[in-house]
Amino acid sequence: MEVEEEVSRWEGYSDWRNRTAVKGRHGGMLAASFVLVVEILENLAYLANASNLVLYLREYMHMSPSKSANDVTNFMGTAFLLALLGGFLSDAFFSTFQIFLISASIEFLGLIVLTIQARTPSLMPPSCDGAMCAEVSGSKEAMLFVGLYLVALGVGGIKGSLPSHGAEQFDESTPKGRKQRSTFFNYFVFCLACGALVAVTFVVWLEDNKGWEWGFGVSTIAIFVSILIFLSGSKYYRNKIPCGSPLTTISKVLIAASVKCFASGSASNAVVNMAVSPSNHCVPKGKKEEAESQGEVEKPRQEEVMPPQAPQLTNSLRCLNGAADEKPVHRLLACTVQQVEDVKIVLKMLPIFACTIMLNCCLAQLSTFSVQQAASMNTKIGNLKIPPASLPVFPVVFIMILAPIYDHLIIPFARKATKTETGVTHLQRIGVGLVLSILAMAVAALVEIKRKGVAKDEGLLDSKETLPVTFLWIALQYLFLGSADLFTLAGLLEYFFTEAPSSMRSLATSLSWASLAMGYYLSSVIVSIVNSITGSSGNTPWLRGKSINRYKLDYFYWLMSVLSAANFLHYLFWAMRYKYRSTGSRS
């Protein structure tokens, strides 16, 4: 009877009451379904404000266009970068369950602050007196940014914990569990798009027509309801027990390897420390002694010959092997073979992460200049006039259509064709997304050539009149862009989660969001460099002029396409040399 009970436990996982999780009772698709519903509401609450925040800062807080755009970029970039903090805390000290609840509560508090300010005239800057508008300042400005960055902190924690929490619900030791996990990541992006669709249509309409207190209010209610739904699934979750700081392990291995290299001149003669076997590498705190008393974990004795199944140092990144020396320079720098190999895995993933930043840079460019292009075109569909700010609807809808098709048609066909478990490997999927981003920028350049051609033929280059060409041409580039986002984001989330060491999964998954933040920052840098170079010697910069019709956007889009192609070649260099470590990831 005791043996049957032991087999039914999820080792290394607990339920919400901190008791050992039980197979058949905790985890599975039902538990992950709560996470998917929560993601719809969470992304709705975030994007409802982020997508229209420039307008709020400019028209209601009376900020200058450049300052409002810069503040929004900083807000969005900070939110995604803080996902790294959420992921780190989920791995090191708290469970993903706890981090989500803490982060959602912080975002809820920030939204309450913003709602109160938007609803109370005395907390807003005074109304414009003729042409003069007093920009928000002092305590009112402080209240604005306290609210915004509480939201950013909450969003970061949620992004760093929620995807990992959902993925942890599946049994990766079985093919069925791994396939369900892959489906989860596809539908996670689908649900993200569902929330975005409501945000950029219904909530943005409320903000523009009913007032910003309504928009902030809807976001506040959405995040509150998401907390209630998340809590309602508590009894079904299996929560991974944190194993300590992954940054401590990474830092210790890198420092130990460096010290050993300088001390001996070579790490090749190191006698490795085999003190930790795979079975007890991440034994939850408080359970190691119990496991040892039951004979589940053998206590290594000095001069004991370790069993063959102990981890072995690999030949890749051999410069780190010296960190596993049996006689470290200092006891605080003692590293096990498993720790060294885990750090190697993380370092091998970083080039893949770096290669996705360019794609997110393309996303940022299209979300800014494309809106300006559409504003100069005919935005009517029949008798319905579409606001240019609603252009994000196109990639969102494409993602919602493509995600189920990919999961239910493309992947099953690929599995049969390749006779492999995944059908399409993680890196192949990311690569497809990068290729689609190249095509997106090329299509954007061709569309801009057509748009400017119409403006020239009609003599409207310097006019603010609407061009007699439909804005639906812009939807073509969004078709490729939405497809690229689906392939790359879902592929990255699954790649980082499955390939990262179990003690670093939340932190590694957070790199997907950090890539998005860095893409936005890089886009601003590229625009500045292009204008600086092309504006030298008295020439007009490519991305400046009396109107967008005078911009050389087509040149800029071609440049982005070329840079994306070069980035793809760089990606191929690393992807072709990468060796998967996780079961079911190999082609």
Image (cartoon, helix red, strand yellow):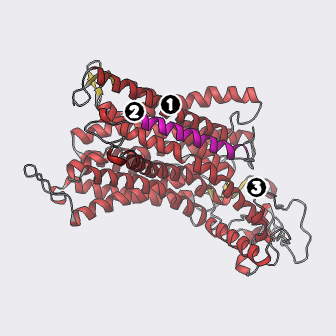
What is the span of residues highlighted in magenta in the rendered image?
553-576
Quadrant position of the C terminus in the picture? top right
Magenta includes 555?
Answer: yes
Say whether residue 450 is visible. yes
The residue identified by callout 2 is 393
**x, y (%) of residue 561?**
51, 36
Name the residue located 66 percent from the left edge and 37 percent from the top edge.
428
Q: Name the residue furthest left.
A: 130
Above-or-below relation of 313 to 358 = below
The residue identified by callout 3 is 5
In-front residue for pair 68/492: 68
Mark 3 residue type? Glu
Mark 2 residue type? Val
Name the residue located 71 percent from the left edge and 39 percent from the top edge.
176
Q: Which mark is residue 480?
A: 1
Q: Name the residue furthest top.
A: 382
**Is 230 left or right of 502, judged from the image as shown?**
left
N-term-proximal mark, 2 vs 1: 2
User: Callout 1: helix, strand or loop?
Assistant: helix
How far is mark 1 from mark 3, CA to CA?
51 Å
Q: Main secondary structure of the magenta part?
A: helix
Q: Nearer the viewer, mark 2 or mark 1?
A: 1
Name the residue located 36 percent from the left edge and 48 percent from the top edge.
536
Above-or-below relation of 481 to 57 = above
**x, y (%) of residue 411?**
66, 30
Mark 2 touches mark 3? (CB < 8 Å): no
In-front residue for pair 477/125: 477
